[in-house]
């Protein structure tokens, strides 16, 4: 039973990850232009790290706060 519950949490987190990652890719590559962000912030590494954190942290939050059915 416990394994099924963890699979459910992972499934919701994975769905959120794919949707959120897709949205950020669309915004950064299509709308904002990545090079514009690099020029604005002045550091390629900083922009990369911030973008990865914008994907990973909300995904972890979804995993942690997903309610388990009992």
Image (spheres, rainbow, N blue to C red):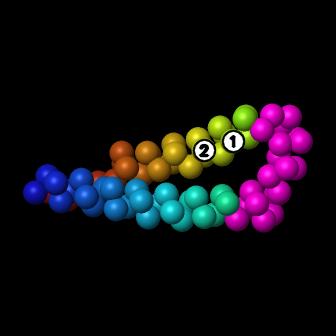
What residue lies at 27% left-to-right and 60% top-to-bottom? 8
Q: Quadrant of the C terminus?
A: bottom left
Q: Quadrant of the N terminus?
A: bottom left
Q: Is residue 18 left or right of residue 22?
A: left
Mark-to-mark CA distance, 1 and 2: 6 Å
Give the label on residue 52, or none. 2
- Residue 26 % position (x, y): 70, 65
Asked if the stretch drawn in magenta spans residue 32, the answer is yes
Q: Is residue 68 visible?
A: no
Task: Provide the residue designation for mark 1.
Answer: 48
- Residue 20 % position (x, y): 56, 60
Q: Are marks 1 and 2 in contact (CB under 8 Å)?
A: yes
Q: Is residue 40 visible?
A: yes
What residue lies at 60% left-to-right and 64% top-to-bottom? 22
Q: Is residue 66 left or right of residue 60?
A: left
Residue 29 position by quadrant: bottom right
Label 2 residue SS: helix
What residue lies at 18% left-to-right and 59% top-to-bottom? 4
């Amino acid at each position: 039973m416990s394994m099924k519950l963890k699979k459910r949490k992972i499934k919701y987190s994975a769905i959120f990850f794919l949707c959120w990652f897709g949205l950020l890719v669309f915004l950064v590559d299509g709308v904002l232009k990545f090079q514009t962000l690099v020029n604005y912030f002045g550091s390629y590494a900083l922009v990369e790290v911030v973008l990865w954190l914008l994907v990973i942290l909300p995904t972890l939050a979804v995993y942690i706060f997903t309610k388990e059915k009992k």
